[in-house]
Image (spheres, rainbow, N blue to C red):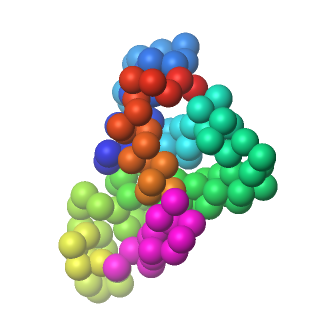
């Protein structure tokens, strides 16, 4: 949820998106990560390392989509595993706290940790980074 909220905060501040449209949607983190990695601040950070920034952008897009799917409103029929409510799996009810979320194991890779560092930077430098 923190990822969704930081994405909304930047979009609210740095784009002409209507507030009603923004508040009614649970997706936007993937688009935010793309915009964030293309921001002047990130281009400065990765100056001379364009390929590294592009690799990070691909990993960020993959992880951001998986994180977006944790919201129950995003793709309940195609991806019932969400972070907020239990769901039916065969004859069993699965509680979010007991589920492993295999796609999120990517967060434990070096690229995943780099994406988490980007999220932390987006939060800590909100006042100084513009998209």
> What residue lies at 59% left-to-right and 32% top-to-bottom?
41
Q: Residue furthest front?
A: 48
Horizontal and vertical percent position of residue 130: 53, 24
Does residue 95 belong to the magenta stretch?
no
Horizontal and vertical percent position of residue 57: 65, 52
Q: Where 29 falls versus 76 (above or below)?
A: above
Q: Residue furthest bottom?
A: 91
Horizontal and vertical percent position of residue 129: 50, 27
Q: Main secondary structure of the magenta part?
A: helix
Work out whether residue 108 or residue 121 is closer to the camera in this orientation and state it.
121
> What residue lies at 30% left-to-right and 78% top-to-bottom?
99
Q: Where 67 falls versus 125 (above or below)?
A: below
Work out whether residue 97 or residue 81 is closer to the camera in this orientation and state it.
97
Does residue 107 belong to the magenta stretch?
yes
> What residue lies at 48% left-to-right and 49% top-to-bottom?
118
Res. 131 image quadrant: top right
Is residue 26 shown to the viewer in this render? no
Horizontal and vertical percent position of residue 51: 78, 55
- Magenta residues? 100-114
Work out whether residue 114 or residue 79 is closer to the camera in this orientation and state it.
114
> What residue lies at 47% left-to-right and 64% top-to-bottom?
113
């Amino acid at each position: 949820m923190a990822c969704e909220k930081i994405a909304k905060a930047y979009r609210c501040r740095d784009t002409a998106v209507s507030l009603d449209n923004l508040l009614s949607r649970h997706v936007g983190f993937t688009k935010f990560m793309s915009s964030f990695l293309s921001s002047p601040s990130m281009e400065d950070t990765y100056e001379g390392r364009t390929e590294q920034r592009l690799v990070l952008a691909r990993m960020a897009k993959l992880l951001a989509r998986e994180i977006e799917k944790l919201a129950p409103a995003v793709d309940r029929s195609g991806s019932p595993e969400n972070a907020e409510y239990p769901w039916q799996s065969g004859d069993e009810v699965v509680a979010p706290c007991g589920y492993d979320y295999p796609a999120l194991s990517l967060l434990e890779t070096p690229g995943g940790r780099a994406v988490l560092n980007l999220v932390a930077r987006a939060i800590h430098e909100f006042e100084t980074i513009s998209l």
